[in-house]
Amino acid sequence: MTSKTLIIGACGQIGSELTRALREIHGKDQVIASDIKESNPEIVASGPFEIIDAKDYEEIKHCVEKYNVKTIYLMAALLSATGEKYPEKAWDLNMTTLFNVLNLAKNKVIETVFWPSSIAVFGPSTPKSNTPQHTIMEPTTVYGITKQVGERWCEYYHKNYGVDVRSLRYPGIISWRTKPGGGTTDYAVEIYHKAIEAGSYTCFLSENTSLPMMYMDDAVQATLQLMNANSADLSIWSSYNLAAISFTPAEIADSIKKIIPDFKVEYAPDFRQNIADSWPNSIDDSLARTDWNWSHTFNLDAITQEMLQKLDKKALI
Ligand code: AKB
């Protein structure tokens, strides 16, 4: 039996796209999708799917043994905004699932792990522009704390137990197929949906809040590139800085207005403004670019064109 890949959190925004991409590359039966419930009918129908509570080590192990899984992508997490509403739940989910997967690798049940980190590892004392890989990290959100601590554990498991765990500090990810849930950068997806559905949007961040962002196709590409890289070429075993573009809500609105001239945006910042203000506005990802040849493709106008075109088609189906 050939070795397989398991995606935990396969119904979510990034997990669903990774499942789709990996199934296209390796064949649908090579990639096992799993989640706590069947919330993405397309993913459930497009190959093997298992309900797994990733907080339960034995449940993951059972699935791994059933399918001969050697690689796990752990994409389940509570994000920054939801994490602030349920701090203990965020800590429990984000850390327990990470330990379960790291321990499966430590115990040689699996060989390789991908675990996403985030720009949320940074905080108000971090240099805001062109934020370096190694810098002050004092995150103020529970989500950011779990990502920062998780990075330390990834590096610890690599150095002390030889675990091959790879990670990226994702910026805000923009995609049309599956909506994000519970993040601070979600506005940059919502705005496209509302532009098509209503011609107007009330943004929960202020107009000049600049944040690092990336189109989903670039994020999937980066993830697969890192996972395919030769381990000898990797200099970071905590999590790589990763960047594409940065923009503000006003800039994304202007980009949309080039295609929908009557589009209207209002600004009503809420608790997520504080979170956004604590994060960098641009990221230095030169190590990713030199270690494994990362480069992004999509700029803001290219993202806007794709998003509006795809969402418009989706609305018509
Ligand atoms: C969030 O906004 O919480 C996430 C992230 C930047 O990790 N999209």
Image (cartoon, rainbow, N blue to C red):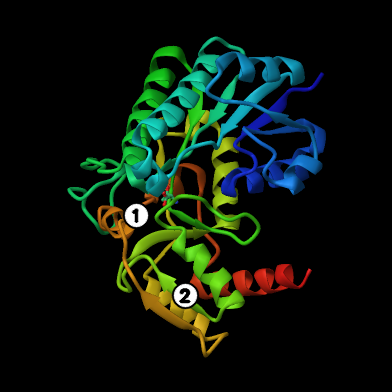
Report the residue that reaches farthest toward the front: 85
Mark closest to the chain's N terminus, 1 or 2? 2
Q: Residue at x 49, y 71 (%)?
A: 300
Residue that carries the numbered disc 2 in the rendered image:
201
In the rendered image, the quadrant that contains the N terminus is top right
For disc 1, the marked residue is: 283
The answer to whether residue 238 shows anywhere in this view is: no
Left or right: 165, with 18 as reference point:
left
Q: Residue furthest bottom?
A: 261
Tell me, for residue 6, which label it has, or none.
Answer: none
Work out whether 136 lies above or below 155.
Answer: below
| Vertical placement of residue 44 versus 259, above or below | above
The amino acid marked with disc number 1 is Ile
- Coordinates of residue 178 in the picture (x, y in percent): 62, 54
Identified at 80% across, 38% down, the residue is 47
- Residue under the point 73% across and 18% down: 68
SS label for mark 1: loop
Mark 2 burial class by Cα count in 10 Å: few <14, some 14-19, many 20+? many
Q: Establish if 37 lies above or below 212.
A: above
